[in-house]
Amino acid sequence: MASYRKLKSGWKVIISKRDSSGQLKQVSKNGFETKNEAKLYAAKIESQENGVFNLKKDTPFSRYFFEWWKTFKEPKLSDISNARYKNISSLLKEYFEDSQISKIDRITYQKFINEYGKSRSKETVYKLNSIIRACVRSAIQDEIITKDFTYNVEVAYKTEKRDIEYLNLDELKRLTTVTLAKLNPNFTSRYMILVGIYTGARIGEISALTWKDINFTDRTISINKSWDYMYKTGFKKTKSNASNRTIRVNKKLLDILEQLKQNDSEMIFENQYKTIPTPTSINKTLKKLLCEAKIDKPSFHFHSLRHSQVAYLLFKGVDLYAISKRLGHSDMTITAKKYAYLIDEYKQRSDNQIESLLDEL
């Protein structure tokens, strides 16, 4: 039995047949220019003995992943997550070509992970492997393969440690001073940089701010959405539920932001061209300001302001729990793990303080 659908990429056919135990098995193929071509293909498969079952086992790994993603994952994933799955599908097609999923073993898959991990971080490789493992488990459920070739894979990744740059107290003051001196309501990227300095919020969160998100009485900024730079669809959800938060700020920052009300826009940072500055243009402005402040940090970018906020608050003795909530992390362990390099840096100072306190006993 076959069914047909017209897609943007052409006609798709799904061929179904029940096995001896009564379970329904399906295989599909798309890209046919006409419905008649799809029908001829279906008739050929159905005429073969065990055609559906054999074809299912002959499915290329990349094609099975694509179909699994489209069927089970795409409807419930965000645009960003679907883009990741699409990239993995292309990656599998490039590496494994038309290799059948039933022919792939643990050594073959390990070699793939080794190659992929040469230039990727630990987090990136772990994410890729977890997604592929879910796909492989689905293939086992579909009785296409009998063994999990991702089982006990050794995740390989780039071990080179990249130093994360942040500003110390003196540098942060210099950048703030230079930025304040260069403010012009027509060029909103400088205002966005100031918000980054004072809040540590992500660039997408800041870009999405509207005047309704600011409470001038309580001196708070509400982070409840983000800005979609990738697909240019406007507002989107924040990174996680924990990212929805309210940040307390100082009156100085709010007074500065009020300058932008003259632009007469619901969006706080809409510029003279009626657009929100892109991350590229914001980082370009930030590099100019760093240069004027005589700060030599080639790798410093907007997200580094988030690191600088953490460094500043730790330096001033702010509790890690409060910092975690301000950043929008779901729990304190995420903050401790992500900023361990900063916490270790200030540990010596805390140890000295503890030693002095013990001497007073």
Image (spheres, rainbow, N blue to C red):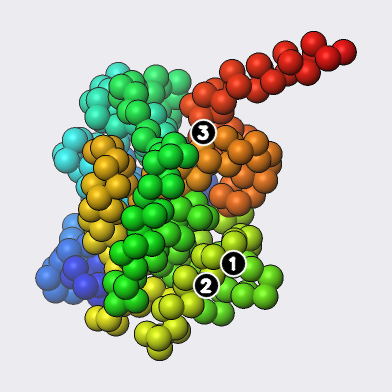
Total labels drawn: 3
Asked if the residues shown at circle 1 and circle 2 are in contact, with their CB atoms under 8 angstroms apart, the answer is yes
Drawn side of residue 349 relative to residue 56, left or right:
right
Amino acid type of the residue tagged 3 in the rendering: Tyr
Asked if the residues shown at circle 3 and circle 2 are in contact, with their CB atoms under 8 angstroms apart, the answer is no
Q: Nearer the viewer, mark 3 or mark 2?
A: 2
Question: Is residue 186 visible in the rendered structure shown here?
Answer: yes
Residue drawn at point x = 80 percent, y = 13 percent: 358
Gap between marks 1 and 3 measured at Cα: 28 Å
Amino acid type of the residue tagged 2 in the rendering: Asp
Residue 156 point in image, percent of width and height: 34, 22
Label at residue 23: none
Circle 3: element type: loop
Residue 30 point in image, percent of width and height: 22, 62
Q: Quadrant of the N terminus?
A: bottom left
Circle 1: element type: helix
285 relative to 54, above or below: below
Q: Nearer the viewer, mark 1 or mark 3?
A: 1
What residue is shown with label 2? 255
Gap between marks 3 and 2 measured at Cα: 31 Å
What residue is shown with label 1? 251
Gap between marks 1 and 2 measured at Cα: 6 Å
* First-in-chain label (1 vs 3): 1
Asked if the residues shown at circle 1 and circle 3 are in contact, with their CB atoms under 8 angstroms apart, the answer is no
Amino acid type of the residue tagged 1 in the rendering: Lys
Residue drawn at point x = 54 percent, y = 65 percent: 252
Instruction: Choose between 230 and 73: the one closer to the eye.
Output: 230
Q: Quadrant of residue 266?
A: bottom left
Drawn side of residue 254 relative to residue 44, left or right:
right
